[in-house]
Image (spheres, grey):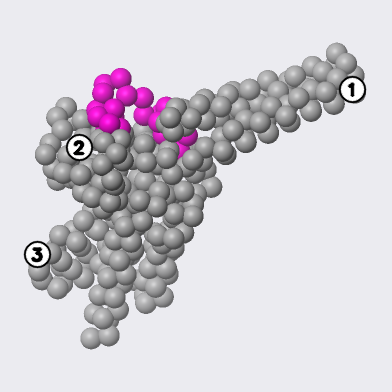
């Protein structure tokens, strides 16, 4: 199965990390025990092992790893504070609906969500394949973290227990801890921007939300606002994300995020023209 292959990939990646020093030492030992030819032999063996492990990890499907991790981590976050609320279940259903999953795929997503709720769930084992495959794809990592933060906020605010899961997730993904607070603030702003827009609240409130969505102060210059907008659009561009490993099923979620960023930028521009 896809997730069995992902687990094997994680193990292979870990093996490579654990044995890289041993491989080097083997070459050194080869040098002292077999002289020049021992060094060459050790180096060749080390190279072959390294290449084989890297190829095995690279051959895995990042989209399947993303799919499994999305719903299983979502399940762990929902269960983190002891009880899964109806809002948290509904959020998972909404994500499935946005992805337009067929019945078989939906059942698989629900299976992963249930897996994540299990006390024995090992977050590192599931996230590690994703971390390996997304090592040079920070925008996809960001998208994953944002989806999980939205899950944590589904019932209002992020609890202490949910925040611990998010922090463990970011550590496993090698996602900068100093970026977490910034992402939390932006995800909250996106939620408020959407909700306030639906509720028809005061335009000044929506304008304040718009600045928060872009992650800039209201005092920012036009150039700073434009730069922040372009950075956000680059990070959330649907086609770019899919090409870097985001499941095609999640393109609607990416589109929605990019549309919110676009709407926030347009609101700021219009307000500054007035």
Is residue 77 visible in the rendered structure shown here?
no
Residue, x 58% and y 24% (percent of image)?
15
Where is residue 109 shown, x and y percent of the image?
A: 29, 38
**Magenta span: chief secondary structure:** helix
In magenta, the rendered stretch is 111-130
Q: Quick one: label 3 or label 2, which is nearer the N terminus?
A: 2
Element type at marker 1?
helix
Q: Quick one: label 3 or label 1, which is nearer the N terminus?
A: 1
Where is residue 256 shown, x and y percent of the image?
A: 29, 61
Element type at marker 3?
helix
Residue 235 is marked as none
Q: Is residue 96 left or right of residue 222?
A: left
**In this view, which residue lies farthest toward the bottom?**
274
Q: Does the magenta segment cover residue 113?
A: yes
Q: State the quadrant of the N terminus.
A: top left
169 relative to 240, above or below: above
Q: Is residue 195 left or right of residue 125?
A: left
**In this view, which residue lies farthest toward the front?**
103
- Residue 146 versus residue 270: which sits nearer the camera? 146
Where is residue 145 shown, x and y percent of the image?
A: 35, 45
* Mark 2: few/some/many CA within 10 Å (<14, 14-19, 20+): some
* Mark 3: few/some/many CA within 10 Å (<14, 14-19, 20+): few
Residue 37 is marked as 1
Q: Which residue is mark 2?
A: 159
Q: Does the magenta segment cover residue 23?
A: no
Residue, x 44% and y 60% (percent of image)?
239
When asked about the image quadrant of residue 262, the answer is bottom left
Q: Which residue is mark 3?
A: 199
Q: Quick one: label 1 or label 2, which is nearer the N terminus?
A: 1
Task: Give the spatial CA distance, label 1 vs label 2.
Answer: 60 Å
């Amino acid at each position: 199965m896809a997730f069995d292959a992902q687990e094997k990939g994680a193990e292979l990646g870990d093996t490579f990390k654990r044995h890289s020093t041993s491989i080097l030492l083997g070459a050194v030992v080869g040098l002292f025990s077999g002289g020049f030819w021992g060094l060459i032999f050790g180096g060749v063996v080390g190279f072959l092992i390294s290449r084989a492990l890297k190829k095995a990890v690279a051959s895995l499907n990042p989209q399947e790893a993303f799919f499994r991790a999305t719903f299983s981590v979502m399940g762990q976050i929902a269960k983190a504070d002891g009880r899964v609320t109806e809002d948290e279940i509904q959020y998972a259903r909404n994500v499935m609906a946005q992805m337009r999953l067929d019945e078989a795929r939906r059942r698989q997503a629900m299976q992963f969500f249930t897996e994540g709720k299990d006390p024995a769930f090992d977050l590192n084992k599931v996230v590690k394949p994703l971390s390996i495959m997304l090592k040079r794809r920070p925008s996809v990592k960001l998208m994953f973290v944002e989806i999980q933060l939205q899950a944590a906020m589904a019932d209002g605010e992020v609890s202490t227990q949910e925040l611990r899961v998010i922090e463990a997730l970011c550590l496993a993904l090698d996602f900068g801890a100093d970026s977490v607070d910034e992402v939390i603030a932006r995800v909250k702003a996106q939620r408020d921007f959407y909700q306030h827009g639906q509720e028809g609240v005061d335009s000044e409130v929506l304008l304040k939300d718009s600045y928060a969505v872009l992650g800039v102060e209201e005092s920012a210059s036009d150039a700073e606002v434009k730069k922040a907008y372009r950075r956000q659009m680059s990070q959330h561009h649907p086609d770019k994300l899919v090409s870097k490993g985001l499941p095609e099923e999640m393109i609607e979620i990416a589109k929605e995020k990019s549309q919110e960023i676009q709407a926030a930028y347009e609101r700021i521009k219009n307000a500054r023209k007035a």
